[in-house]
Image: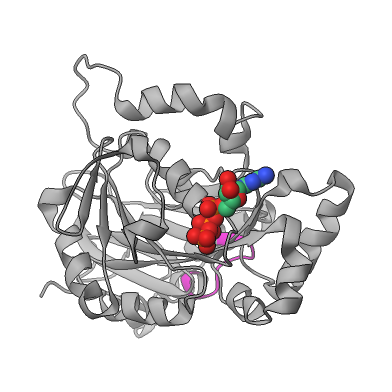
Amino acid sequence: MPVVVLAGFLGAGKTTLLNHVLRHADGRRIGVLVNDFGAINIDALLVSGASGGTLNLENGCMCCTTDAGDLAETLATMAAPGTGLGAVLIEASGIAEPKALIRMVLAARSETVAYGGLVYLVDAANFDETVTAHPQVIEHLAIADLVVCNKIDLVPPAAVPALLERIRELNPTAPILPVADAAVDPELFFEPADQIACDDGPRQLTFDELMAEDHGHHDDPGGAHLHATFDSESLETPSAVDPRRLAQFLERPPSGAYRIKGTVYVDLDGHREIAYVVQAVGGFIRVEASSWRGRAPGTSLAVIGAGLDTAATRSALEGVVAQVDGDDVNGILHLTRHLVTAT
Ligand SMILES: Nc1nc2c(ncn2[C@@H]2O[C@H](COP(=O)(O)OP(=O)(O)OP(=O)(O)O)[C@@H](O)[C@H]2O)c(=O)[nH]1
């Protein structure tokens, strides 16, 4: 279960983003962690009941309050198989130090809890004023894994390129998404809904679908807007990876990449039976050993981001499988050192 830290200056649009993601959860179960329900204002419509620090949202999502002391415990509870949560978003309050929250999430990592990166929201309309008055925003931006440049509707179109350039100077590698109403596609954080196992029998419209219809005009003024905001590049091949080159690729992803995921084949004695499932976000790499379960071994890798140099990403992906150095006996250690072992 990836745990995504959501931060941004006061009023940048964090609550708007949470509501948008919950409305477009589209069959995924998403957990939300906030410091205090009083401060967050999850749309009343989405809330069906509250008890003991947990809100059950009508679309099947779960919302909890927490404090520093029990974050690890709360995340472990949320990651338990019974909850079925695909991911958790934690909102750092407007003045919170995101680094402290990131450290807490990193400390809470386990076999079931993974760090999902820092998503940082900026208010496009007040960017210069905020940065001048609160220089810590520069530091936060610099460590973001994904920058959401929200309220772009309030910026004259001619001024947008210079604004994005200014953000790019402060963070040269993270994808930058210019959006209105924090309309970020949840697929950036989570698996697409069509990859989630579900029964295909006849069913009623879900609450999410109804909400998406009701609010479509508001959240998605441009029609294709939702899916137009991110890029992905992928590779699917029966070839094996060079583990050292794969580890280097995961450690230093191409500019504009937010996350990398996939399953890879390692053609070395003792490894051929293992399907290695890899994930990376913000330089944090996670490798799990699985089995091929009757599938033909092979490598499939996907890079998800925005502003990706697709040609460079493609050639980097191809480089991972192109040059397997059979004499590099230590190469595999670069991959297996990220293995998550059962506890
Ligand atoms: N015009 C415009 N307004 C927006 C946009 N996104 C959010 N808003 C408005 O900006 C205000 C602040 O948004 P929130 O989502 O509450 O911001 P926040 O970061 O959660 O705020 P704090 O919790 O106070 O830090 C609200 O009135 C939103 O309706 C946008 O893209 N364009």
Q: Is residue 124 visible?
A: yes
The secondary structure making up most of the magenta span is: loop
Q: Closest to the observer: 97 or 108?
A: 97
Residue 111 shown left or right of residue 179 in the figure: left
Outermost right residue: 158
- Residue 17: % across, % down: 50, 49
> Magenta part of the protein: which range?
250-257
Q: Is residue 327 visible?
A: no
Outermost top residue: 202
- Residue 102: % across, % down: 40, 76
Considering only vertical position in the picture, is 204 above or below 145?
A: above
Protein image colouring = one colour
- Location of the N terminus (image quadrant): bottom left
- Residue 286: % across, % down: 33, 69
Considering only vertical position in the picture, is 175 above or below 154?
A: below
Q: Could you tell me how many numbered marks the image carries?
A: 0
Magenta includes 255?
A: yes
Outermost bottom residue: 330
Q: Closest to the observer: 13 or 81?
A: 13
- Residue 70: % across, % down: 20, 75
Magenta includes 253?
A: yes
Rendered residue at 36%/39% (across/down)? 44
Task: Determine which quarter of the picture holds residue 73.
Answer: bottom left
Task: Determine which quarter of the picture holds residue 112.
Answer: bottom left
Outermost front residue: 38
- Location of the C terminus (image quadrant): bottom left
